[in-house]
Amino acid sequence: MSQNKVIAIGLEMMSPVVFEKWCDEGLLPNLAALKKKGAYRRMMSPAEISSSSTWPSINCGVNTGKHGMAFIHRQFVSGTYETTRKRANEVGKPAFWEGFKAAGKRVFLMDVPDAIVYDVDGVEIVGWGLEYKTWKVDSNPAGLIQSIFKEFGTHPLDGWYQTKESTAEAWLDLKEKLLWATRTRTKIIKKIMTENQFDFSLVVYGEAHYAGHLFWAINDPAHPDYDAEIEKAVGNPILEIYQECDRAVGEIIAMNPDATIIVFSNSGVGPNYSGRHFVGEILSRLGYRPKKEVSTKQNKKSWLPAGDVFAIQKIENLVGQRNIEKIKSLIPEKFWDKWTRKFLAMGSDWKDSLAFDIPGDNTGLIRINLKGREPKGKVNPEEYDVLCEKIGKQFSEMTDPVTGTRLVSEVVFPHKKYFGDYMQDLPDIVIKWVDSQDITSMQSPETGLIEMPTLPDARTGAHKDCGFFLAVGDGFRQIDGEKETLRLAENHDFAPTVLKYMGMPIPEYMDGSPLEDIFDNNGRNA
């Protein structure tokens, strides 16, 4: 087994399609050099469940059914008709590096999503600049994070409430903040690496995550939010932030010329086209949930969010995003998380439905109101599979009323794909939409024509299934994933591959497998 120190660099939500293109064009020279001499392939993720599922699968080496982290922002709580915000200490399996201390290996972790502060021998920083926090701002050793804040400042988007900017000046300001944050993160990493020696490092650049969500439409003429004048003024923010990440990789390698380098992305990114805002209406027209009553002044419950998956966006439009940001800053986080989630589910018709849509990311998520699982379940367990298949078929028949093309790319039944003790926390049906067009209308013989505005989401970029994995170092062979036909990696293959390379045992509970074909043939890692 290799004795090299290993440095893993996570470039969150970096698209392999864009990554490969810009490497080929010479726009990411350091990453292109690694790709040319390393083991590269695309890496599938469970982003169809939610982007929230990707990192626990990477960290723990298991499928989503074993770690239970679905749409953690507003995750449906099995046995209730409520949602909750999940935290990093609720991940159902341990992180793969937890055994490193006992094995005498020193570890450096920085802003790994869905990670708590562990009792590692080494350094860990949680919360300097996570795109979404699932744990308190903390560090090991205690107090280190405060000294970092003092020396380097706070992340410019820490506590920032994601908004869709409307002026070139605002977009430029946002871009500059993220470029500064990327450079500053590299300075922090280099400082810690200079002052310490580690056997394994895992550092994550969340700035690429922000960029993918926020800036996609700026350089995509096909997107309905594209504005040529904005593009001319702002440039290409995603490329610039990717290039800053590329420079970071080069600087880290220069400091550690003999280290094994792993660069990876947890998921891809693409246009945020989705029909998930249609799901509730489709279920209603198909008879699976009650038809919505027209709100009147006499309807005392008309002000309730009614469990709407877009209740947050509607409240933002009513109250204002900046005002919500101010209110949130005045309220303790745990109180805010608990009671806003309870409020957002109030007035829902979930208990009266056979099937209902639940909050999610880019896909449509459907929950069956199952007897024995839900408090007021209406569907008998023996009817479950037939009903799931029926609903899936009905959604597959939704078409564009103009072109006649199908708008659903795939229907996934998690109970057939995932497994583990947390299956009850997952949706029962996942609707994956075509990502080639903005969806504002659809129809089928059973539903008739349904017309709705563009997806009410401030983010113009969305998570896509595929990220990538790239490993360069003693013991790895050169594999050009575009020229050699090999199986895709999976998020949950990441942990066992690292463990095998470092000569560590692979726990039996892990679902992933080491990527055997990326190891060289000299027996070093066989």
Image (spheres, rainbow, N blue to C red):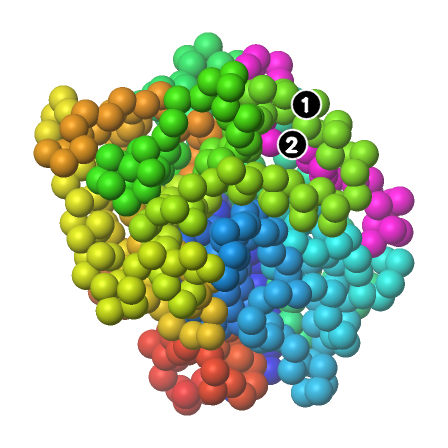
Q: CA distance from mark 2 to mark 1?
A: 7 Å
Magenta stretch in the rendered image: 145-171
Q: Amino acid at mark 2?
A: Tyr
Q: Which class describes the residues within 10 Å of circle 2: few (<14), some (14-19), or many (20+)?
A: some
Choose between 125 and 401: the one closer to the eye.
401
Residue that label 2 marks: 161
Is 474 above or below relative to 446? below
**Camera sees residue 488:** no
In the image, what residue occupies the spot 24% across and 41% down?
287
Q: Which residue is mark 1?
A: 322
Who's the residue at 55% across and 50% down the image? Answer: 83
The mark that comes first in sequence, 2 or 1, is 2
Q: Quadrant of residue 171?
A: top right
Instruction: Give coordinates of residue 466: x percent, y percent.
Output: 37, 53
Residues under numbered marks 2 and 1 in contact, where contact means CB atoms less than 8 Å apart: yes
Could you tell whether 224 is left or right of 31 in the image? left
Expressed as whole percent of the image width and height from the top left, the position of residue 282 reads 27, 36
Residue 218 drawn at (x, y percent): 45, 23
* Residue type (three-letter) at the residue carrying disc 1: Arg
